[in-house]
Image (cartoon, coloured by chain):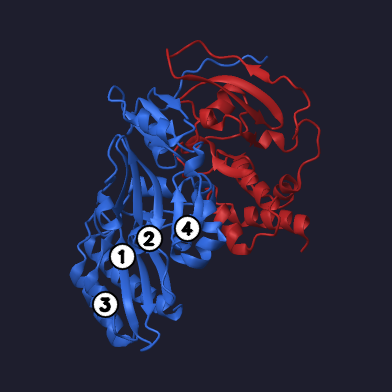
Amino acid sequence: MTPSVPAPRTVRTPPLAEPSGWHRITLTVNGERITAEVESRLLLSDFLRDRLRLTGTHVGCEHGVCGACTVLVDGEPARSCLTLAVQCDGAALRTVEGLAPGDAPLTPVQRAFHTCHGMQCGFCTPGFVMTATALTEQPERPGPDEVADALSGHLCRCTGYRNIRRAVCQALDERFGE
Amino acid sequence: MTTIREARWLKPTPFDYTAPRTLAEAVALLGDPARDTKVVAGGQSLIPMLNMRLARPELLVDITRIEELAHLTVDASGALRIGAAVRQARAAADPAVRHGWPLLAAAISHIGHPQIRGRGTVCGSLAHHDPAAELPTAARALDARFVITGPGGSRIVPAEDFFVATFSTAVDDDELLAEVILPPPPAAQGWAFEELTRRHGDFATVGVAVLLERDSATGLVRTARVVFSGAGPVPVRLSAAEDALVGTGVDEAALAAARSAALAGLDPSDDVHASAAHRRETAAHLLVRACTTAWERC
C-alpha cells in the first residue's frame, strides 16, 4: 500500500456551500494518496461516495446500525456513516474497490462470497466483505464466537446469513488452513 | 483530477471542527462562551445525533489526537487509569484490564459490535451517559473516579456523583472527562455482567453488574456490589440486594433474598421496549444468574 507517486491527487472542492468549517485533509484511499477540502460535517461515507465516486461503499441506515457502509480505517472495520471525513486526516482507508482493482484477481474473501453465494441482493455485501477481510488479516484465526460477533455488526435484509457465514469460514480456512 | 458532484446533501447541521494536540488547548476551546462546543472522540453516539440533527453544535473538539489522553496504565497504587482517547476495543483487549478488571472487559464486549468498539472510547460512553449503556453501570460497580478538567484545572468526582440524569453527568459545558480511574481490585473478587437485549448488540432492556468479594477466613461474602442498567435515569446501585448477600455463601436463601430485594427496590419505567413490570422481573432474574456466576468466579 506504499504510494508509488509522491504527489497526492487533489480532489476538487465543490462550490462553497458554507462559508466556514472547511479543512484540508490528506489521506490514503486504497493505496492512493489524496488531498481534499472537506466540510467539517461531511461524513466519511459521503466523502467516499460523492467526492471520490467510490460508490461501492453502500449507505443504508445512516446511523450505525446496518453496517453496509463499513470500511477499513487503518486496518480496522469502522462505520463510515459514523465517522467524519475530517477525522480521517492522515489515515489509511480501504474500501471494497481496493480489494481487486481493475483486472486483479478476486481476493480469497471475494472468491468465497462468490462460490458460497454469500449474497442475494448485494446491498449489504461491501460491508460484510470489508469486515471479513479484516478477520482474514488478523495474526491468528478468530474463533467462531469472534466471527459471529463481527458478522453481527451487519444486517442482511435478504437474511442470507447462513451463506455469508459459510463464505467467511471458507475464506478463513483458505487463509489459516482448516 | 476527477470531476466531482456538487455537494447537496450533508446530514448534520453546519459546524466547525478542530483537533487540538494538548488538553490545555481543548479546554480553552470548550470555555469559549461565544460558541456552542461539543467534545467528540469516537463519535459513535454523537455522530448519529448529528446525522439526525438532534445535536447541533457549532464547534466539535476532537480529543483523539491529544497524546496526554491516550494512556491506559496501571499506576503505582495499582489503580487503572484510562485516558479519554482510549478506544473501547483497546481497553477490552488489554492484558492488565482483562486480569485486574475483567468486569470492565465483559461490559465492553456487550457494547454494539466490534465495528463500534473499535472507534468508541471508554470515557466517551461514560460522558454520554445513556442509562441503558454498559460502561456507566460497570464504572459505578467498580467505584470509578472521574477526572474532569476545565478552565479551573482538574477535579475528581466519585461514581455516585458523576451520573446525574439521562444523558447528563457532572461534566460541565466548559469541561471534559479527561480520565477515568478504577481502584485496584481486591484479591478474591468474583464478577458477572448480565443483560437482556432483544438483538445482539442492542442497548439492553435491563442489565446488572455484580462484584462479590470472598472473605478468605470465613469463605463467605465480605463485600457485594450490585448495580443495574436500564432501571432508572442513572445506574442503580441496590444496597438492599448487597446486604442480602453479605455474610452468606450465596446459597438459595441468599439468592432468594437478593431477588426479593430487587423486586421490591427497583423502580424502572415503562417504555416502548418493555413494561416496568417486565423490566423488574427480568432484572431480578438476571441478578440471581449474575450472583451465581460471580460467586463461582471468586
| Subunit ID for the residue under disc 3 | B
Decide which of tag 3 and tag 2 comes sooner along the chain.
2
Q: Earlier in the sequence, mark 4 or mark 2?
A: 4
**Residue that label 3 marks:** B258
Mark 1 lies on a secondary structure that is: strand
Q: Is residue A170 left or right of residue B203?
A: right
Q: Residue under mark 2: which chain is it in?
A: B
* Residue A82 against residue B212 in the figure, above or below: above
> Contact, CB < 8 Å: mark 1 with mark 4?
no
Q: Rounded to the nearest whole Å, what is the CA distance between mark 4 and mark 3?
A: 35 Å
Residue B25 in percent (x, y) is at: 42, 30
1 or 2: tag closer to the N-terminus: 2
Circle 2: residue type: Ala
Residue drawn at 27 percent across, 39 percent down: B172
| Mark 1 or mark 4, whichever is nearer to me | 4
Callout 2 crowding tier (Cα within 10 Å): few <14, some 14–19, many ≥20: many
CB atoms of marks 1 and 3 within 8 Å: no
Q: Residues within 10 Å of mark 1 (few under 14, many from 20)?
A: many
**Observer-nearest of B221 and B69:** B69
| Circle 1 chain | B
Q: The chain coloured blue carries which letter? A: B
